[in-house]
Each structure stands twice: as C-alpha cells, then as structure tokens.
C-alpha cells in the first residue's frame, strides 16, 4: 500500500469518528477558501489582461477610463450626497486600475482634482480661510447667461447652479410659532456660507433680525395704556385712558405691519425665515446672482408646499370639529400657516443689483465662496458670472419696480443683447413701493451685505435715506472691499449721518473710521433713525 493510500485511509477512518457538525463546518471552510482563490485569480486576470478599458461596477457607482468624471449618488434623509470615484486611493480596485492608465490620462485627472479642490488664498469676508472638504467636488460646464425676470413669480425656482440640486437641511431659528425649524436648500458642494449653515445650523447675524423687527414695531406703534383710576366725588372710578399716539414719523400703515428689506439675499439663510416666521407685511429682497437665486427660490417653493399641506390639514380639522380639541400650540401653528397665498404675497424677490446709476455691470464671484459676489471690479473674486442689471434704489421705488423702464437692455450673452422681461408686478406691489417713496409706508429693518458696494447703493438712495424710510439699517463694513470699489468707510458713514441716522455705540463717525482704517476687517453695525426708544442697539450692536 502506497503512502498516499495509507494517508487517505487514515483520513477516512478519522472522519468517520467526527461528528456531522464538524464535517459540515470543514466543508464550508474549504468552499470559502476555494471561492477566495477563484475570485482573486479572476480579479488579477482582469487587470493584467487589460480589461480595465471596460466599465467595471464598484459599489454604488461605476468607473470608466473613457469619461473624466463619474458619480454615484446615495439618497439620505438630508438630500442627495454625491460620491466621486477618481482612482486616487491605493487600497481599492480603482486605484490599481488607474495605475495602468497612461501618463497623459493620469496628468489630466490630477489637474482636474487640483482645480476642484483649490482654495482662495485671500482672507474671505473677514473670516479665516477654510480648507475645502476632502469629499467630492462637483464640476460642470457653465451655462450661457440668460436674463432673469424683474420680479420672481413665486411659482417655480428661478436661476440655476450646476446640476440644480439641493442639499436640504433644517436650520435653527430663534423665533416662536409656527415651528422652530425650517428647511433650507443648500449647495451640495463645499462653500463658505453653506458650510457655516451646515455646521452651526444658522448664519451668524440672522437671529438679530426678528428682534430688530419687533423693536421697530414697538418704536412705531407703542402699546396701548391700561385703564387708570380717577377720582369722581371722592370715589375711585375706572376710566379708559386714550391710547398713545404713534411714534414720531410713524407710517400710515394698517394693522401695525412693517415690511422688511434685504440687499444681498445670498441663499436666503436670513430672508427665508423672516418671510415665514415673522408678522412682516412683505419682504423685499435683491439678489442678482442666478446661482444664489436658485437656492433661495427653491427654499421658498418648499415653504409654499408645506403651507398648502397645513392648509388642507387645517380645513379637515375645521370641518370635523376637532380644531378646538387640539392643544393650543398646535392650533396656533395651523392658524398661522393656513395657506400659501398669504405667504406668496409677502415675497418680493427682485433679481437685480443696486447701485448709483442705472446700467449693467459684470458680476464676479469667488471660488469656494459664492456669497462674495462683487459688482464691477473683481475684489477677491475672479470668476466672471455675467452681466446683471443695476438700478438706483430711488428710481426703483419711484418706477414701482419696473426694471425694464430703467434698464432697457443687458448683455445677456456674447451673441448680443436681450431685453429684460417686463416686471410681473401686481398693482398692489407697485402701490406699496410708491407709498414708501412718498413717505406713507416705512420699513422696519433693512439688512444689507453688498461686498463693498454699500456706498454706491446709498448714493442712489439719497431720497429714501432723507425721508428715513428704514427704522434700522443692519450693515457690514468691509474696508478692503470698500477701497476696492473706490469708496471708504468714512464716506459711507457720512451718508448715514447726513440723513440723520446714528450708529450704535459710536458718538462720532471719525472714531469708527479711525478704528477701521488700515485694517482688513469686516464688522457688523446698526444704524437707526430718530430715537432708539425700543432698545434696538442692545440687539444689533
């Protein structure tokens, strides 16, 4: 008997003594080892036989050497997250395949990665430069510039950016009912403002604006006094006291409602909550960037859709007679958000820029900080977005918002000029603007963030400043951006001082200018008209 036969007979003899469970476990281990060996052999045969020229599925996506970029999307509760497979790792199959690609192909991929991940070297908006996330970076071919309507119709999103996708996030708001959180459409790629909202749940100065709005209401419309006791024939009698008259310069407005205005809406991190959660009459916003307009309008469309759902729920509860059985908080929430019509009437979003002349200017933006949209001159922004219409604020109100009457044409593309569509303004909207221009209506709060264009905006708004159409002006002073536009903080503050506005915390304008001169800083300040009897400076300073 040979040695092999002896060994096999001994193995069979021992296996007969094993339990069935041990035998099955051994067979499973042998099968698993065989599968691993076969898979490894086929895997290396693909690489060495040159099969990497075909599409090879990897996880949820695919990679192909014939395409520069490939994507895999995984849906989460927050939105759509894009994962980019570029073959830049050494431990996965893609990395091994990519090493077989020729050198020109490698260089092209490396240049593309470097272009997507570049970071602006200059200090951005007074904050420390942030390194981009090491995650995916979206790329796309720029679309041709197209003109925008003079006023958003509130029906469908306006503007565009890359793939026109939203990363939906709930942002915190320090406001009361109807609810504490609201949805905001954020950029699905790395950006300074978007990253801050993702990280903190809000944008820095937004929480002050509702408080300033309430302070303006208290200043214009003081609360009524309670009844007091008067002596009649020696006996105390309760007698009503006439209500206080409205504050000095109070507008002729019904229901004690004040409008809100924002210059430089950006992605709507302040504008959207103000339109949804405060009792403003309407919100007039100016934003010339089509990229920013897409995210702002998308957020508002979702607000309208949620309001329609609440309206149906409210009607069902009212018809069933269960409305009074709901808790007080839920009942107030339903009553405050009854339909989207009321919310739509509040929205006045104008896709135009403001300046000292009626013209059209080139809009620049900064890679990694789309909020740094600069007009006319590339101050820390070298990416050309296109031509946008620029109007004087005084003329905009005097014309009732008819931008086409002010700027007849803009350079829409290289092929020629395109007429600006006529303003889709309702008669009520036009009358509101005319009432403000004539001093019959005033804004409670004006928030402006114009990247150094503030002085030129106020040069074109001297009439509105003279009649003090804004109770509070919440603004930023960025000295380097102001100097880049050929103006200064001193000139900007003098425009406010000549119009009778006061700056919170500073008795003399020169003190503030001296504090800012020669420094690359961005500071937020508050100007107020008349007396600050409502304590607005304690909120905004």
Image: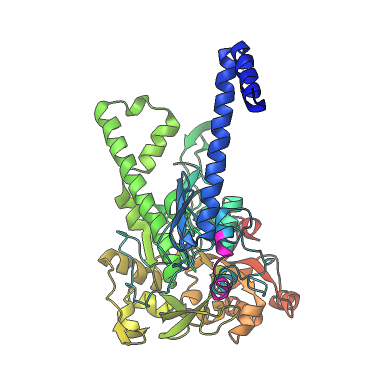
User: Is residue 58 one of those drawn in magenta?
Assistant: no
User: Is residue 98 one of those drawn in magenta?
Assistant: yes
Image position, residue 483 (x, y; %):
64, 83
Colour convention of the picture: rainbow
Image position, residue 15 (x, y; %):
61, 16
Q: Residue at x 46, y 83 (%)?
A: 362
Residue 319 appears in which quarter of the rendering?
top left
User: Can I make out residue 272 in this image?
Assistant: no
List the single residue furthest toward the front.
1
Q: Residue at x 63, y 73 (%)?
A: 120
User: Can I make out residue 507 in this image?
Assistant: yes
Figure check: 408 above or below 235: below
Q: Nearer the viewer, residue 245 or 18?
A: 18
Image position, residue 428 (x, y; %):
28, 64
Q: Which residues are magenta?
A: 97-107
Figure check: 210 above or below 520: above
Q: Nearer the viewer, residue 220 or 324?
A: 324
Asked whether, in this view, residue 328 is left or right of residue 196, the answer is left
Q: Give the number of callouts.
A: 0
Q: Nearer the viewer, residue 383 or 133?
A: 133
Q: Residue at x 30, y 30 (%)?
A: 317
- The quadrant in which the C terminus is found is bottom right
Question: Does the magenta stretch mainly form a helix, a strand or a loop?
Answer: helix
């Amino acid at each position: 008997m040979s040695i092999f036969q002896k060994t096999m007979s001994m193995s069979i003899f021992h296996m007969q003594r094993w339990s069935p469970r041990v035998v099955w476990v051994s067979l499973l281990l042998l099968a698993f080892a065989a599968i691993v060996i076969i898979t490894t052999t086929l895997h290396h045969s693909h690489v060495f036989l040159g099969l990497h020229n075909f599409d090879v599925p990897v996880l949820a996506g695919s990679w192909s050497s014939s395409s520069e970029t490939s994507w895999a999307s995984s849906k989460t509760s927050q939105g759509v997250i894009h994962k980019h497979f570029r073959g830049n790792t050494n431990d996965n199959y893609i990395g091994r395949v990519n090493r077989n690609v020729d050198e020109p192909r490698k260089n092209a991929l490396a240049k593309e990665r470097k272009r997507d991940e570049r970071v602006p070297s200059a200090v951005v908006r007074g904050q420390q430069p942030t390194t981009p996330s090491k995650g995916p970076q979206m790329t796309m071919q720029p679309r041709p510039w197209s003109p925008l309507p003079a006023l958003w119709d509130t029906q469908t999103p306006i503007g565009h950016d890359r793939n026109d996708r939203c990363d939906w996030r709930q942002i915190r708001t320090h406001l009361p009912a109807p609810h504490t959180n609201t949805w905001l459409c954020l950029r699905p790629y790395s950006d300074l403002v978007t990253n801050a909202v993702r990280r903190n749940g809000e944008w820095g100065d937004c929480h002050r604006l509702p408080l300033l709005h309430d302070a303006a209401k208290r200043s214009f419309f003081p609360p009524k006094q309670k009844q007091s006791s008067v002596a009649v024939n020696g006996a105390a009698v309760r007698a009503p006291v006439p209500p206080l008259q409205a504050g000095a310069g109070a507008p002729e407005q019904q229901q004690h409602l004040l409008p809100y205005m924002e210059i430089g809406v950006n992605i709507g991190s302040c504008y959207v909550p103000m339109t949804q959660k405060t009792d403003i009459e309407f919100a007039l916003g100016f934003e010339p960037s089509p990229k920013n307009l897409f995210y702002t309008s998308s957020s508002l469309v979702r607000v309208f859709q949620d309001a329609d759902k609440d309206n149906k729920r409210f009607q069902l509860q009212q018809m069933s007679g269960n409305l009074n059985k709901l808790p007080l908080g839920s009942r107030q929430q339903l009553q405050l958000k009854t339909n989207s019509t009321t919310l739509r009437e509040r929205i006045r979003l104008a896709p135009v820029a403001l300046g000292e002349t009626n013209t059209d200017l080139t809009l620049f933006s900064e890679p990694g900080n789309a909020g740094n949209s600069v007009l006319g001159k590339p101050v820390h922004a070298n990416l050309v977005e296109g031509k946008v219409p620029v109007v004087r604020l005084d003329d905009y109100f005097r014309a009732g918002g008819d931008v086409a009457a002010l700027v007849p044409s803009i350079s829409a593309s290289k092929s020629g000029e395109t007429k600006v569509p006529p303003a889709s303004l309702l008669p009520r909207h036009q009358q509101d603007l005319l009432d403000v221009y004539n001093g019959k209506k005033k804004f409670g709060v004006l928030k402006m963030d114009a990247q150094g264009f503030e002085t030129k905006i106020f040069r074109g708004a001297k009439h509105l400043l003279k009649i003090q159409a804004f109770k509070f002006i919440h603004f930023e002073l960025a000295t380097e951006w102001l100097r880049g536009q050929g103006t200064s903080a001193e000139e900007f503050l003098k425009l406010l001082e000549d119009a009778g506005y006061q700056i919170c915390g500073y008795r003399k304008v020169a003190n503030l200018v001296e504090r800012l001169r020669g420094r690359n800083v961005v500071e937020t300040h508050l100007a107020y008209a008349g007396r600050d009897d409502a304590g607005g400076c304690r909120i905004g300073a």
